[in-house]
Image: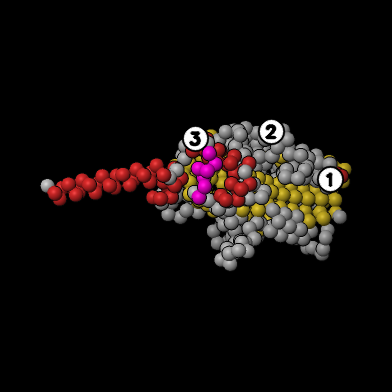
Amino acid sequence: MRKNRKIKQKIISMAVSFALIINALPLSGVSEFFGVPTVLTASAYTEESTWTGVHDYNFQNSDDFVSYCHWYATDATFANNHKNDTISISLTNATISDDYPGLGTSANPFQGTVTFADSTSLTITTNRAFFSYLSDKASIVGTGSTPSDFTLIINRPGSVAEGTSAPVLADHIVHYTGNPEDENDNEVTVAKGWKVQVTGGGTFSGAIGEIGNGALVDLTFTNNTGNNIESKAANEAGSIPDAGLFCGSMGSNSVYTVKYVSSNALSHDTTSTNGNAGTFVGTMGTSSTLNVVTDITTISSDVKASGAEAGGKGNAGGLVGYMDSTAVVQLKETAEGNADRSLSTLTIGGSATGNNGAGGLYGRYGFNSVASLNLNDYNVTATVSGKYCGGLFGVLE
């Protein structure tokens, strides 16, 4: 009897201790105490202190995730404290509300890990890019045995709104240069490898809006929609006025390898209201490199750029709108074993119409140093129309 009494006393003592811990800790503290991700509900967002010290979240509904991203977008301290978070997203065919700001800010690009609760793919419906500012340090993975073998599917029901751009994966990619306070946290030298697919009936502004200076991107981009590419954003700081299927603009020394998967020919329209436009990329900066891995051998897109000449915009190209001579475009085959072999010839048809320059290859070619261009890689048949136009280059400067 005495032994049973002692057991009961221990059980009561443990229950009291447990209750004291639960009452003393906020929801986030309970999660940390037991070492499991926090499952947050709407009520958890009423006080910012809820987030203090917690960096491992499991979002189970889109409203909670949108709320988190709003904290991130509107509070610089919050963003700085949470830019390295590990985020788990357990949403299935979720629709994200139109007030979603995207994850990441210019001052604090998201550079942590986003794990989606599926081994191969997960679909999210949104009319904007999933990320606003994404570091090339960030990981986008699934829960399978090979986490990186995961595709984020973005369903785009609506088209690009007036005055905006709407890429698929991210508005901006920012290069991570390392943490000077941590000798083990070094600059990114190898691209992570992300996968994204676009579905739905709406127009979009390419896979990525802007790839910043020095950023390294390796993206598998699947697009079977045939939907048109457009940017209606103003030509101003923070906006992405340039338009291209793979990217609006690439900064200096950036390297972008895109493995393009599509059952459709490249016959969509590409339009920029206030910038440059190209079938592949709107603008390629100094010493930027675009590696396109594809089995598509023909382009028949209609490219239009209406930007102002005074702002260096309004250039339309069958390949790239504005191309610096130190930039490089390389075409590779997708067949297994041939990934390092150049595509035999790319035929560029369709049309290029620019308010400024218009060319079958490049609307404007900025000649900054001695450059070589192997024209045997291209068979240009596109029609061109612009203030300055030519079969290959609209403006050669």
Residue underneath mark 2: 161
Residue 325 in picture, x, y percent from top left:
79, 58
* Residue topped by disc 1: 311
Seen at 48% across and 46% down, the residue is 57
Q: Is residue 188 left or right of residue 376?
A: left
Q: Is residue 330 above or below residue 97?
A: below
Q: Nearer the viewer, mark 3 or mark 2?
A: 3
Q: Amino acid at mark 2?
A: Ala
* Distance (Cα) linking label 3 and label 1: 45 Å
Q: Which residue is mark 3?
A: 42
Identify the mark nearer the N-term, 3 or 2: 3
Is 156 or 336 nearer to us in this picture? Answer: 156
In this view, the residue in front, 292 or 88, is 88
Q: Is 292 on the left-hand or right-hand side of 24?
A: right
Q: Which mark is drawn over residue 109?
A: none
Count of residue discs: 3
Q: Secondary structure at mark 1?
A: helix
Dot 2 or dot 1, earlier in sequence: 2
Query: 227 or 196, which lies in front?
Result: 196
Q: CA distance from mark 2 to mark 1?
A: 23 Å
- Element type at mark 2: loop
Figure check: 248 above or below 46: below
The kind of residue tagged 3 is: Ala
What span is colored magenta in the figure?
A: 47-53
Q: Quadrant of residue 339?
A: bottom right
The structure residue drawn at horizontal position 71% and vertical position 39%, both measured from the top left corner, is 231
